[in-house]
Image (spheres, helix red, strand yellow):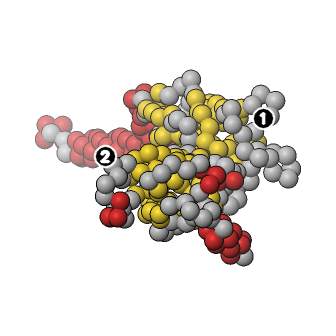
Amino acid sequence: MPHVIIKLMILVAWFSQAQGLEIYPAKIYLGKSEGTLEFTCSTYGLQDALQRTSKFHIYLCRNGVGIKMKLSWQDATFCVDDTRRDNTGYYSCVYSVQKYNIDQVRQNGTNSIFVSVNDSFVPAEIASSQTHVITGSDVEFQCTSLNLPERNHKGNIYAVLYKNSTVIQMNIWDMRKNKARFVLKEVRIQDAGKYICFLMSEPLPFPKNVYGVNEVILDVTVIFIQMYRYRLIIYQHYRPDWERNLLRLIFSVGVVIFACCIIIFDFKTRVRPPELQ
């Protein structure tokens, strides 16, 4: 239903365009980088009737109303913040030879792109005093941000520690200190990787594409002493069996030697020299 209302608004704006303005529709394409929507307006193949004009005034429109303008020969790129909810709408491009005020432009382009902006998500900065650690150490991350999303109905904001497409921890934002703290206890080799931090007013729905202002790469090293201790523990675990086997072998050899001594002694006592008989 909201999409239908927006389309009706576009049609009304289009048909209510001021008479006498020579404005022509253009093509629009969308690209995206971290935190920014990049709209490219193109007049390629559309300005055949205006071959004599070297440059055009190209306008980016939202819901059929001009919001930005650039002077270009063929293409123009406009950047829009993708964290502001009021940037939600249908985007299109138009162009003209004569320059008009942006608020005069009331027209739709050749095609349009609908963009839904969720201002619940805000990228944040992450820092850590320890980026090269050994297994078993504790690592602390600090998450900070000057921009905050809208608070939820409970008045909270959530800070998320994220690594390799996985949520590692989620804490409530400290409004007084304006930061969040994360601690990884007794890190393992699997904890190594790139960490980012971002803020959300609600944990769900979770955005498809998340990013931070920066990233921290955690390097976890397994030292040789730990591996040696591990092997020593394994050796000590199996040591009693070796001792028992060794004792059994010694006892068996002793029994054999003792039996041989008895047999030799008995043989000597039974077989005497002839002169003694």
In depth, the one of 166 and 209 nearer the eye is 209
Amino acid type at mark 1? Asp
Q: Is 116 drawn above or below residue 149 in the view shown? A: below
Q: Position of residue 152 (x, y in %)?
A: 81, 51
Q: Quadrant where the N terminus lies?
A: bottom right
Quadrant of the image occupied by residue 173: top right
Residue 182 visible within the image: yes
Mark 2 and mark 1 residues within 8 Å of each other at the beta carbon: no
Secondary structure under tag 2 reads helix
Badge 1: residue crowd in 10 Å (few <14, some 14–19, many ≥20): some
Q: Which residue is mark 2?
A: 256
Left or right: 81, with 220 as reference point: right
In depth, the one of 274 and 175 nearer the eye is 175
The mark lying in front, picked from 2 and 1, is 1
Residue 165 visible within the image: no
Most extreme residue toward the left, as rendered? Answer: 274
Badge 2: residue crowd in 10 Å (few <14, some 14–19, many ≥20): few
Most extreme residue toward the top, as rendered? Answer: 129
Q: Position of residue 233 (x, y in %)?
A: 47, 37
Residue lying at 80% horizontally and 47% vertically, measured from the top left: 151
Amino acid type at mark 2? Val
Q: Position of residue 205 (x, y in %)?
A: 68, 61
Which mark sits nearer the N-terminus, 2 or 1? 1
Residue lying at 48% horizontally and 40% vertically, measured from the top left: 194
Q: Which residue is mark 1?
A: 174
Q: CA distance from mark 2 to mark 1?
A: 79 Å
